[in-house]
């Protein structure tokens, strides 16, 4: 898949002018704070309707703007499609070729993986970040997973509401039985998908041990029975995929305690490359790959070796304040785009 053009309206500081891209490598240059990362973020938003930097979608809006929109042209399987993701304070409008589509249908149209400083939360952050890392990866190769995860989340919310009602004496305790069955059934699908994907990722990154700890159906059912009164008191479900853990270990110790800052960044980058490789094998085509602010803590030689492993025809978009790291991306055909005050003021192709 190749993103040939993008236009952003009221998206951070980006100018509402179309930007065209090279089919191989696109290197964004310019002073800090000019909008290089914002352009990468617009690409990510176009594909996912989310940001790779923040969970606060409202922060993507240009100051005082009531709505924003990102549109692009994507070549895939010999066909060019137009994609559009728009949002205001109350709704989201997703379109393919000018027709409104559902979120699952939209997310299947374009796939992108991003590496940035914020992705270090995969190693350093809370368990939710690691579960999100797995869920996004599973969804990238299994389009049905998003609906399966949504089903589990819906069951979880309804069960939590029932627990609260039971604690207030508005519902009988035995009304939990049916919801326990629903929870166990929907949880089994999520756990199996996460477990399989974790094994595949771990096989791609031998420098680190990745341990996924989910709960099987029998164990989950037993925990729900054993902790029923605790759950009623707390008003929330205390077992299930929402509490799964993923550990990254080096010689049996937590990676974030053993590895230097630069080594952690390299491991996260390797995890991203592994996701790209799995996607390529599943669909016989690479996704788009975003590299934001590659810095001096990364080993340049290792980075070059990793870049060589990217599947052929991977379209890459990269920013960095370090010229030496950008040069690692310039071995083949590429385009340099100069970004100033949110606008691409110059573009030059190199063979």
Image (cartoon, helix red, strand yellow):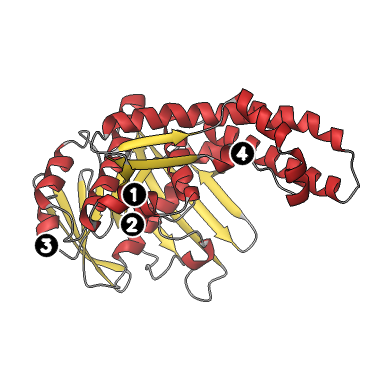
Residue at the spot of label 2: 40
Residue at the spot of label 1: 114
How many numbered circles are shown?
A: 4
Q: Going from the N terminus, do you reach mark 3 or mark 4 first? A: 4
| Category of crowding for the residue at label 3, using alpha-carbon neighbours closer than 10 angstroms: few (below 14), some (14–19), many (at least 20) | few
Q: Going from the N terminus, do you reach mark 4 or mark 1 first? A: 1
Outermost residue, top side? 218
* Residue ID at (48%, 48%): 127
Q: Secondary structure at mark 3?
A: helix
Tell me the distance, in whole angstroms, between the alpha carbons under discs 4 and 2. 27 Å
Query: Above or below — where is 190 with respect to 235?
Result: above
Q: Closer to us: mark 3 or mark 2?
A: 3
Residue at the spot of label 3: 323
State the image quarter where residue 66 is shown.
bottom right
Left or right: 240, with 303 as reference point = right
Q: Going from the N terminus, do you reach mark 3 or mark 2 first? A: 2
Quadrant containing the N terminus in the rendered view = top left
| Category of crowding for the residue at label 1, using alpha-carbon neighbours closer than 10 angstroms: few (below 14), some (14–19), many (at least 20) | many
Q: Is residue 78 visible?
A: no
Residue at the spot of label 4: 150
Q: Secondary structure at mark 2?
A: helix
Tell me the distance, in whole angstroms, between the alpha carbons under discs 2 and 1. 9 Å
Tell me the distance, in whole angstroms, between the alpha carbons under discs 3 and 2. 18 Å
Tell me the distance, in whole angstroms, between the alpha carbons under discs 3 and 1. 20 Å
Q: Position of residue 102 (x, y in %)?
A: 59, 40
């Amino acid at each position: 898949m190749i993103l040939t053009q993008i236009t952003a309206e009221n998206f951070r500081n980006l100018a509402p002018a179309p930007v065209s891209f090279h089919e191989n490598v696109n290197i964004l240059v310019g002073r800090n704070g000019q909008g290089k990362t914002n352009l990468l973020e617009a690409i990510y938003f176009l594909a996912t309707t989310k940001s790779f930097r923040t969970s606060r979608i409202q922060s993507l809006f240009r100051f005082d703007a009531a709505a924003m929109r990102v549109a692009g042209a994507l070549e895939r399987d010999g066909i060019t499609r137009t994609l559009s993701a728009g949002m205001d304070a109350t709704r989201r409008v997703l379109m393919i070729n000018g027709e409104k589509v559902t979120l699952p249908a939209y997310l299947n149209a374009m796939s992108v993986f991003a590496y940035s400083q914020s992705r270090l939360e995969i190693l350093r952050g809370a368990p939710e970040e690691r579960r999100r890392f797995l869920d996004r990866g599973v969804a990238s190769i299994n389009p049905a997973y998003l609906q399966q995860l949504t089903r589990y989340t819906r069951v979880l919310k309804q069960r939590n509401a029932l627990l609260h009602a039971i604690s207030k004496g508005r519902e009988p305790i035995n009304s939990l039985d049916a919801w326990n069955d629903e929870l166990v059934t929907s949880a089994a699908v999520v756990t199996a998908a996460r477990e399989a994907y974790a094994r595949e990722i771990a096989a791609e990154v031998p420098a680190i041990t990745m341990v996924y700890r989910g709960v099987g159906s029998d164990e989950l059912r037993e925990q729900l029975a054993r902790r029923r009164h605790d759950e009623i008191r707390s008003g929330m479900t205390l077992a299930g995929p929402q509490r799964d853990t993923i550990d990254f270990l080096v010689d049996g110790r937590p990676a974030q305690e053993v590895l230097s800052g630069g080594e952690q960044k390299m491991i996260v980058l390797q995890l991203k490359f592994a996701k790209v490789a799995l996607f390529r094998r599943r669909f016989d085509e690479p996704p788009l790959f975003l590299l934001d602010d590659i810095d001096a803590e990364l080993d340049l030689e290792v980075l070059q070796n990793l870049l060589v492993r990217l599947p052929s025809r991977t379209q890459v978009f990269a920013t960095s304040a370090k010229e030496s790291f950008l040069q690692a991306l310039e071995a083949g055909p590429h385009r340099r785009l100069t970004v100033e005050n949110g606008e691409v003021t110059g573009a030059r192709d190199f063979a």
